[in-house]
Image (cartoon, rainbow, N blue to C red):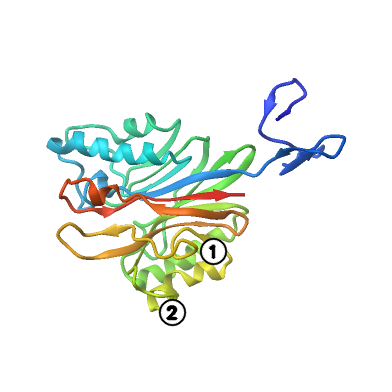
Amino acid sequence: MIYNISGIATNSAYDVSGNHLNRAYDVSGNQVFSGSISLKVMTYNVGGWYTGSGGNVPAAKKDTYYALQTGMITDNDPDILIIQEYLAQFSDDGTSALTMLQGLFPYVHAVTSGTYFGRAVCSKYPITDYVQRAYTQESSRYFDSCTITVNGVPITVVNTHLGLTQANRTPELSQLIGFLNTQTRFICGGDFNTSIMPTETTSSTSYVENVKPLLDEGYHMANFAEEGFLVTSSDKPDGTWDGCLDNIVTSSNISVSGAYVDTTKLTDGLNDKIDHMPLIATVSY
């Protein structure tokens, strides 16, 4: 534990020039502070809080889906939650999604935009400098950014939702990379719509077009990396299609570990289309 000049315990250390320190030592050379930071990040296309078909939760199913959605968030306890397909009304009975999220996180920034392009960032740490950014290829799709400061270290958090076709995804991915390369430290979560099957390989066309450009920049990834190809979307129970659509991507100075998918929807017994499932990873720097 270290203390400031007033004797108050602190989680941050700085040199005499005001630069953030990752480590600090006492006069005998013993390390008294390690500034490494680990955060749990969740990215989740909530599908309007229901099945991703353009509508929110019917009033008759509100209580069940409220328990499902809040349960997955609280069980995984993310420090940062990045949401796509956010609808302002959780249910058609008028239940507010913002009120729900504000009951789970002290900081929430939500953007309501049509049926499929609302989005939100929720955090245990302050959110500042939120900027909405639209892709040139499709103005409805976005790569918004904000700053979340943890222990005195600012992180650019990006929320994105790429296009459904490769003709749109390729230029959008290029535009996203162009922005990410201007950031000192970033975490980017979103629905990348990669539509990569779990049986594909790193030589498949989809992988080469949608994943390799990010890896070539030296970024770290929760999906298609150390934990393998993680299924984050499904048309079950009636269909048979599974896809690895979602990802958490970080700058080279932020590592990613322990990535997994919350598969509660596979066993919840609701017998509704599953759509997306939350992807969670630990990031450290």
Q: Secondary structure at mark 1?
A: helix
**Amino acid carrying mark 1 in the image:** Gly
Residue 27: where, in percent of width, then height? 87, 34
Q: Where, by quadrant of the figure, is residue 18 drawn?
A: top right
* Residue shown at the point (15%, 50%) measured from the top left: 271
Q: In the displayed structure, would residue 262 be above or below residue 13?
A: below
* Residue shown at the point (55%, 71%) measured from the top left: 216
Q: Where, by quadrant of the figure, is residue 87 drawn?
A: top left
- Farthest residue to the right: give it: 28
* Residue shown at the point (26%, 46%) measured from the top left: 48
* Residue shown at the point (29%, 58%) measured from the top left: 233
Residue 183: where, in percent of width, then height? 59, 55
Q: Secondary structure at mark 2?
A: loop
Q: Which mark is residue 203?
A: 2
Disc 1: which residue: 178
- Farthest residue to the left: give it: 60
Between 221 and 145, the one lying in front of the other is 221
- Farthest residue to the top: give it: 6
- Circle 2 or circle 1, nearest the eye: 2
